[in-house]
Image (cartoon, rainbow, N blue to C red):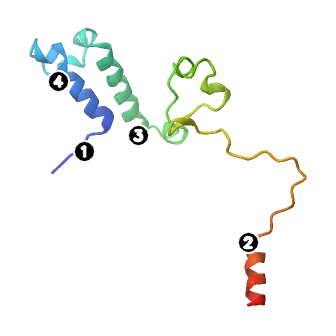
Amino acid sequence: MLIAIPTSGAALAQCLQESECVMIYRNKPSDCLRPPLIDTMPTKCQQLKKGYGECKRGMVDMRKRFRGNQPIAVSKELEGGAGASSQGYQLYAGKPAFTDTAKETSGNEPEERDWREVENEKYRKG
């Protein structure tokens, strides 16, 4: 039976296997994730552990399932100060999720015909 490991879990496992806690001091990876050994782990592993825990918690917490995960806190620095907060708060495929969701109108546009009316006209003509 194969068990699929999520990407964040696989990254955490790899980080643990490459850490000094496991490689040099021969501790179990599970021991390295608990205090006091967690403080000796590299920052990258600690961040991966936190992210993996939040991901697992998000699978159970219904509020997070609907709201999604919060964006990266340093996104303002990454985007040159323009920040994602002015455009939208949630990243999706590299873009804010809630920008350009509705096109702007002046109010003078002609009303779009209903698709059912168009189909009825085609049926009557043909």
Characterize the local packing of mark 4: few (<14), some (14-19) or many (20 or more) Cα atoms within 10 angstroms.
Answer: some
Q: Is residue 38 left or right of residue 57?
A: left
Separation (CA) of disc 1 from disc 2:
45 Å
Q: Nearer the viewer, mark 4 or mark 3?
A: 4
Q: On the image, which quarter does residue 104 sit in? A: top right
Q: Residue flagged by tag 4: what amino acid is it?
A: Gln
**Looking at the image, which is closer to me, 62 or 42?**
42
x and y percent of residue 11 in the render? 28, 30
Q: Earlier in the sequence, mark 4 or mark 2?
A: 4
Residue 17: image tag: 4
Q: Earlier in the sequence, mark 4 or mark 3?
A: 4
Q: Residue at x 53, y 22 (%)?
A: 75
Separation (CA) of disc 1 from disc 4:
18 Å
Element carrying mark 3 = helix
Separation (CA) of disc 1 from disc 3:
15 Å
Q: Nearer the viewer, mark 1 or mark 2?
A: 2
| Residue on which disc 3 sits | 59
Q: Is residue 104 left or right of residue 38?
A: right
Element carrying mark 2 = helix
Q: Residue flagged by tag 2: what amino acid is it?
A: Trp
Q: Earlier in the sequence, mark 1 or mark 4?
A: 1
Residue 4: image tag: 1
- Circles 1 and 3: CB distance less than 8 Å? no
Q: Nearer the viewer, mark 2 or mark 3?
A: 2
Q: On the image, which quarter does residue 29 sit in? A: top left
Q: Is residue 53 left or right of residue 121?
A: left
